[in-house]
Image: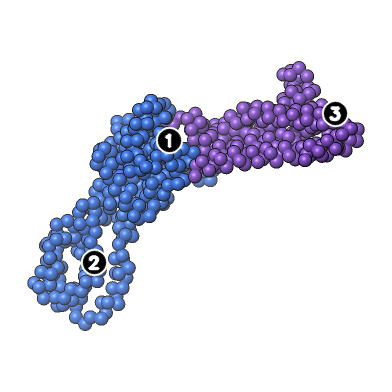
Amino acid sequence: MLGIVSAGIFANNSWMLDAIILATWETFYMVAISTALSYLFGLPLGVILVTTGDGHILESKGFNRILGTIVNAVRSIPFIIFLILVIPLTRLIVGTYIGTIASIVPLTLAAIPFVARLVETSLREIEWGLIEAALSMGANAWQIISKVLIPEALPSIILGIAITAINLVGYSAMAGIVGGGGLGTLAYYYGYQRYEDVIMWVTVIVLILFVQLVQMLGDKLQSITISKRR
Amino acid sequence: MIQIKNLTKIYYTPHQEIKALDNVDLSVNRGEIFGIIGLSGAGKSTLIRCINMLEKPTHGTIIVDGQDIPSLSKKDLHQARQKIGMIFQQFNLLSSRTVFDNVMFPLEIAHVPVKEARQRVSELLDLVGIADKARVYPDQLSGGQKQRVGIARALANNPKILLSDEATSALDPQTTRSILKLLKDINTQLNLTILLITHDMNVIKQICDRVAVIDDSRIAEVGDVLSIFSNPGTDISRSFINAISQKDEIEGYTDKILKKHDSYSCMIRVSFIGSSAGDPIISSMIKKYGIDANILYGNIDQVKETPFGHLTLQLIGKQEAVEESIRYLYANGLEIEVI
């Protein structure tokens, strides 16, 4: 069905189909890699934000306040401005600031504080009694983090990953406007600047499907981890 | 086994200081079940948490098995905590782990080799009677079963002491009895010292050897359970004991009952403990002095293995005969209170 429809739309413009497939792939791997990288840094950051908080296992009030302020500061910069601000850094790491790979740098950097706050929220839901029980057994901070906090918060962390990935789909389209590649670039150059409505609409539909898929996957994974426990 | 001296805990809030514990002294002997009873907010929860440093004392010494706990380094404290088991009102089991793996948890913390640990977990699940639930997650267990897992987990590293923080307060009376029986069995089998806190005198009555009554951040009274039950020295102890009997309600009606009689009458409360509960003293008093005894209320109870009870009587007859009767009861070793 989809084949017939797309064959109809793209009958005289087969380059369009190829361009959309390529752009979708670019968006997918930009989002996948920046989600993964943002958790690589954001998860520990979230754990630190929680555990150095008041009365927690690694309480350190001053450090916690400084870290919290930095996280808030980064989060308050609009992404479109952030993109431009980190160009020197992107150049330093990737060698260029244009293209899909280069986009991963601002996407990841912008997502890290967001992920940290999401992880923080997930970890705060854990009852203090569980931490107290682990402490009473002689657990050290690392054992509490790895054996209590993260496993207990896992269903909630998984949902956070889906939320992050969906946010990054949106951000990646913004990155696309400044030459980041993916569906954003496609929609901007062909849809906006050349008035190719078809490209514009197909891009929107692909993005909708993309987001639905990520959310479904997140929900599914979360319910698997929960139902296993019941 | 546990010696607490001058233990004080003050919580500082921006606007005030709250004294949760005020110069508490307490000593728990090896192998005994020691109960701490108090109302909520009296400080009992803070007290038990100071013993394994879940709460940091403001000052005071806490010696557990020869070690001064507050002075230990972080690493030594972790070691010491492995030998102090703790169970909780809300059980605090990990929902991400099966029953088996929950009991494995403290053994992982102590770096016990896996093979040995698995062996130990199986023994513990047998000991607490839930071996059949090993593969199940805590969400599928009843409260009593969860507490059994909690107990197995607390015993995993062969502790010398078990701290029980209101362990039966979330359970129904029947389950409470079975958990208390399990604690008593463990106490006897393993010669484990148990320190428990509760607000329920029934718990103290059923398994404790000695009890401390805590009121307003201080220890009001300490003694063996039987003597506190039979002869409470403070109002707070009396109120805990009365809470588990109905005699106050009955005695509220005494005015009405007394007015109905023309001849001299007198209300007394007789307390009897142990062997005196077996002698027919009241009956022989009635025969000897020719008075009437109207039984208004009576109960007999058991503190651990010793029978123990109260009888509220109205003695009716000639004044001298009634007074003689009361002296007779005294002479027979009963505790009398004229109401």
User: Identity of the amino acid at label 1?
Assistant: Asp
Q: Is residue B79 visible?
A: no
- Picture residue at 49% right of the left edge, 44% below the top: A230
Circles 3 and 1: CB atoms closer than 8 Å: no
Q: Residues within 10 Å of mark 2 (few under 14, many from 20)?
A: some
For marks 1 and 2, give the CA distance. 50 Å
Labels 1 and 2 within one chain: yes
Residue B202 position (above or below residue A1): below
The residue that mark 3 highlights is A15
Labels 3 and 1 within one chain: no
The residue that mark 2 highlights is B298
Q: Colour of chain B?
A: blue
Q: In which quarter of the image is residue A36?
A: top right
Nearer-N-terminus badge (1/2): 1
Q: How crowded is mark 3: few (under 14 residues within 10 Å), some or many (20 or more)?
A: few
Label 1 secondary element: helix
The residue that mark 1 highlights is B101
Q: Is residue B241 visible?
A: yes
Indicate left or right for A127 with B339 as reference.
Answer: right
